[in-house]
Image (spheres, rainbow, N blue to C red):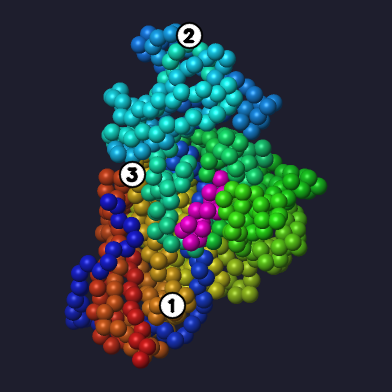
Amino acid sequence: MKPRILLPFCFLLWFVPAPWAQTTYVIKADSIKAHVEPTMYGIFFEDINMAADGGVYAELVKNRSFEFTPSLMGWSERVKDGGSGSVEVVDRSTERPENPHMITLTVHSGTGYYGLSNEGFRGMGIKKGETYHFSVLARQHADSKIGLTVELVDSQGVVIGRGALRPAGLQWEKDTVSFVASATVEKAHLDLWAHKAGTIDLDMVSLFPEHTWMNRPGGLRADLVQWLADLKPGFLRFPGGCIVEGRTLANRYQWKKTIGDVDQRETIINRWNLEFKHRLTPDYYQSFGLGFMEYFMTAEDIGAEPLPILNCGMACQYNSGQLAPLDSLDPYLQDALDLVEFANGSTDTKWGKLRADLGHPVPFHLKMMGVGNEQWGPQYIERWKVFVKAIKQKYPYMQLVSSAGPSPDGDKFNFLNDTLRAMHADILDEHYYRSPQWFLDNVKRYDHYDRNGPHIFAGEYAAQSKDGGSPDNKNNWQCALAEAAFMTGLERNADVVHMASYAPLFAHVEGWQWTPDLIWYDNLRSYGTPDYYVQQLYSLNKGTDVVPVTLHDQTVTGQDGCFTSAVLDKNTHMLIIKFINTGAQAQDASFVISGVKGLSSTGSLTTLQSNDLTAVNSLAEPGTVSPKVQSLPLTGNTVRLSIKPYSVNVIRVVEMLY
């Protein structure tokens, strides 16, 4: 299996003092510089790279409700044993505007089979011994007695799972059947066969594995959510990203359309399907099976604060740049106010009651939300003022995340940074997709930020091995190492930086639009990148309070290619040192720890390292760059060790209390 949470101590590593002088770092463990927020390291989710449909949402049928363009995308006709028939896509948009299409299947022959085959999302990942639950909404026509058979078929045409249904109703009914797969197949497909002459209406053709996250029917892919849980994130930001804005306002994310029965959630085209000419994905849609209720519940499951981001009346400014007029913002504003009621309201309120009706009577305790995603310019400020006034008036406790634009510098950033600071914004959301060198050069970015100004959310960042948005970007060790160095600056300035998240989160190996990404997967397997393990090391070792680390009385920000930060965990009486060596030579270091009565005789050293800066993890070799944990013997109040080249190191020691 792939490595995940850091392994227990595997062996004892004895350190012999080097015969030459060591670099001495001083840690004042009794000098608290800043409190580390529980939300410090979190997760940014966006439905890009087939992250939802075809990814974390475990539905295996693509275009299950026939809402793609064309309506039968992902489906193909099949006949066998002399069968014949036809299929018609029926428009019922007047009756069901949120689910405007269904199909009518007619079998002409009394013998044989006629049907449809679904290709899934780059195939269907099927596991031997797993139970699969098939369902369909069906309605027989008068005098029709069509029977249905569903089969899972491997790439060689071998049936690896089968079930039969006998829909009987003349009104819409949900019919189900379950069966066990006899083989593991990465790229299976589903055949739906009809037999006996007649006509039947079908909609919402669906197939799910039994074992989803928390075993919820129609739920999420368990292995992918487990990667998130293993980060122990402080927050979950959802649903994006540019998804929030949409290419046009009509294509924006509307949370109210993503809750309730899945057949009433309006499918729309995913804004990323045609965004990049080098990665056109015309079959990329959003079914919203993963909607706001699922986001809130997942955040609760993994112990993360929910952070929803809402449209503020602006479409993506890189695309159409459409604006809702200032006097027409009420629907957008009401969505924001109603969301707070949905998350926090009592069951006596309209939206709180709906939350309870959906199975969660207890509030989600929402404390923060975002106004817009990556907007800029005066138009954003005009709309921001309207949102902040209304939300704060009704919910004064709500902390609002505000856009600082798409870049960490330049005219757009400077305008927003100056303007929002002058208006006392709560949290500024800064984004940076830059080279590894930029991350190294900007370790001191927050050292001189106003300590009394808005808090910072490093909401989207990732080092780019080639260029921002390039399809040739890789999740290589050089990028992850630079991010780890940069994060020492985030941690050192935890009084200013309250949240940070890498982006994007997920990517299907055959369905991606953007690289690099934190977690990659195919239909059966998944792996964490070196960047993932950097994020995990910081998140699992964030501590509660920052203490200073100095070299010759100076903060360590890259001297000799080294970067460091230190925190106390007051809950466990642990001192945690993060030390990053970005150089090609080992560094012999001593850490002199003052302000403690003593240290336990043994600590631990976790190392993430590779001598190859181009090294990457993969489905075939998921542990190429992954954490190794060792015991660390201690003498007195000094830690001595040789720091490997190109390495991220986490040293954990326990303070003696007597």
Taking the magenta stretch, the answer to whether it contains residue 36 is: no
Asked whether the residues under the numbered discs 3 and 1 touch, taking CB atoms below 8 Å apart as contact, a structural biologist would say: no
Question: Residue 357's x, y, as percent?
Answer: 61, 49
Mark positioned earlier in the residue sequence (3 or 2): 2
Is 614 positioned to the left or the right of 390 in the image?
Answer: left
- In magenta, the rendered stretch is 291-304
Mark positioned earlier in the residue sequence (3 or 1): 3
Q: Nearer the viewer, residue 616 or 68?
A: 68
Taking the magenta stretch, the answer to whether it contains residue 294 is: yes
Label 3 and label 1: CA atoms lie apart by 36 Å
For the point 20% across and 69% down, which residue is it? 11
Residue 441 visible in this rendered orientation of the protein: no
Q: Nearer the viewer, residue 383 or 200?
A: 200
Element assignment for label 1: loop
Disc marking residue 571: 1
Disc marking residue 525: 3
Is 330 positioned to the left or the right of 253 in the image?
Answer: right
Disc marking residue 108: 2
Amino acid bearing label 3: Arg
Q: Nearer the viewer, residue 390 or 643?
A: 390
The answer to which image quadrant residue 495 occupies is bottom right
Amino acid bearing label 1: Asn
Disc marking residue 511: none
Please name which of the two marks, 3 or 2, marks the residue nearer to the observer: 2
Label 3, residues with CA under 10 Å away: few <14, some 14-19, many ≥20: some
The answer to which image quadrant residue 636 occupies is bottom left
